[in-house]
Amino acid sequence: MNAIVLKRGKDKAAKHRHPWIFSGAIHEVIGSPENGETIEVLDSNKEFLGLAAFSPFSQIRARFWTFKKEHIDEDFFTNRIKSAIQKRNDFRNSSSDNAWRLVHGESDLLPGLIVDQYDDVLALQFLSSGVEFHREAIIKSLQEITGINNIFERSDVDVRKLEGLEEKKGLISGNVPEEVTIVEGNLKFLVNISTGHKTGFYLDQRENRKLISKFCKHRDIFNVFSYTGGFSVYAAYHQANSITSLDSSADATEIAKRNMDLNGFNPSSFEWMIEDAFKALRKIRDIHRKFDVVILDPPKFAATQSQVERASRGYKDINLLGFKLLNPGGILITFSCSGGINDSLFQKIVSDAALDAGVSASIVHKLTQGPDHPIGLNFPEGSYLKGFVCKRD
């Protein structure tokens, strides 16, 4: 088998079972492994450390499959996928919800594989060369384990280019309608798997939608980056006094209105703004309009560490404006899904924003991704979604 030999002193992360090996840690490549092929990983003394998928185009040059000697074949993927789904059964079996993340990449020991279930449809992302190399075995295992044949691929993401792979999007098998209706608690949402963000819906915000709804009753809500209205629908269900939803996408806003209607709320009873969020926030600030609750759930500003400085300025800007739009005693609910922005940096950004806005505020809740998006103890990078519920004094 082809192999890589690590430099002396560069095997600490591997021995602590971190799933990534960076190019700078490699002393030697033995053989000529192709993109995605399984290789042995050896320490500087050429002692076995594990089996990994080789990625010659990426700075993450290899991703561990396992730290023991075993065959990486269909049975391997079947066992790993079964284990990931069983991990979620404790909360899935006690819920009427029909949309979940079934496989969450490295944290489920399947680096680069994302599997989301929307009712009787699976949406897949193959984000690394290793899972792309084994895609047929993975698809077959998923069909057999879940009994679902309606499968759509959403590997239309930039990260594949870093792996030497082309973007892919399209039907893999079965029939996938233009929209799927999912159930979340007592509410329903329309999901467009083909054109929606990520694989169609922000499943990682499920627990946060439920938690922050307690702050909505009889209050004026401003939902910024509202997308298809997840937080807005929850606010309506929990008897908000008024709801203003802001998003730059007319298509997403139209689905948000239909989601309101789907749940028995008249969309015309609420305010909808289709505009750039940064410009709209400044306009609203300038007319001195205020809200009791401001929700900021922007898209990813920093996909990589090199983008952190620019992203930090963007996060500070929107949070400063968010604080300025709050009534005294109001609530700012703010999120970052940028992996390059860690929890402590995000707190500093929000703190600096409050200071520049001339307000005092306290964090009353810390928020993260839901339990179907687990964070491996050996993979802190898996903690990408962070949020704060801040109460203005």
Image (spheres, rainbow, N blue to C red):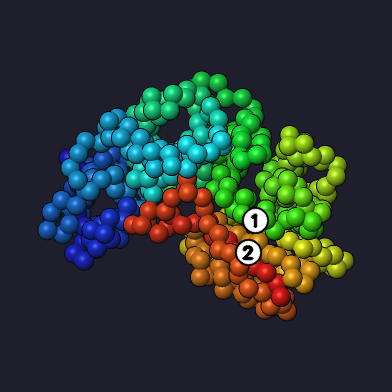
- Marks 2 and 1 sit apart, C-alpha to C-alpha, by 8 Å
Q: Residue furthest front?
A: 94
In this view, 168 is above or below 105: above
Name the outermost residue toward the top: 174
Residue designated by label 2: 389
- The quadrant the C terminus occupies is bottom right
Please give the label number shown on residue 212: 1
Q: Looking at the image, which residue is at 66% across and 39% down?
A: 187
Q: Position of residue 124 (x, y in %)?
A: 48, 35
| Quadrant location of the N terminus in the rendered image | top left
Does 138 sit above or below residue 43?
Answer: above
Q: Which is more toward the observer, 26 or 201?
A: 201
Q: Is residue 258 visible?
A: no
Label whose residue precedes the other's in the sequence (2 or 1): 1
Using the rendered view, name the quadrant where residue 381 is placed.
Answer: bottom left
- Secondary structure of residue under mark 1: helix
Residue neighbourhood size for the residue with mark 1, other residues' Cα within 10 Å, grouped as few (<14), some (14–19), many (≥20): some
Q: Residue at x 46, y 57 (%)?
A: 383
Vertical position of residue 292 compared to residue 136: above or below: below
The secondary element bearing badge 2 is classed as strand
Q: Which mark is residue 147?
A: none
Residue type for callout 2: Val
Is residue 206 found left or right of 167 in the rendered image? right
Q: How many circles with numbers are drawn on the protein?
A: 2
The amino acid on which the numbered mark 1 sits, given as a three-letter code, is: Ile
Q: Report the residue at 68% width, 49% height from top.
A: 231
286 left or right, relative to 122: right
Is 164 on the left-hand or right-hand side of 245?
A: left
Instruction: Say which quarter of the image contains residue 46.
Output: bottom left
Query: Is mark 2 in CB contact (under 8 Å) with mark 1?
Result: yes
User: Relative to the observer, which residue lies in front, 86 or 150?
Assistant: 86
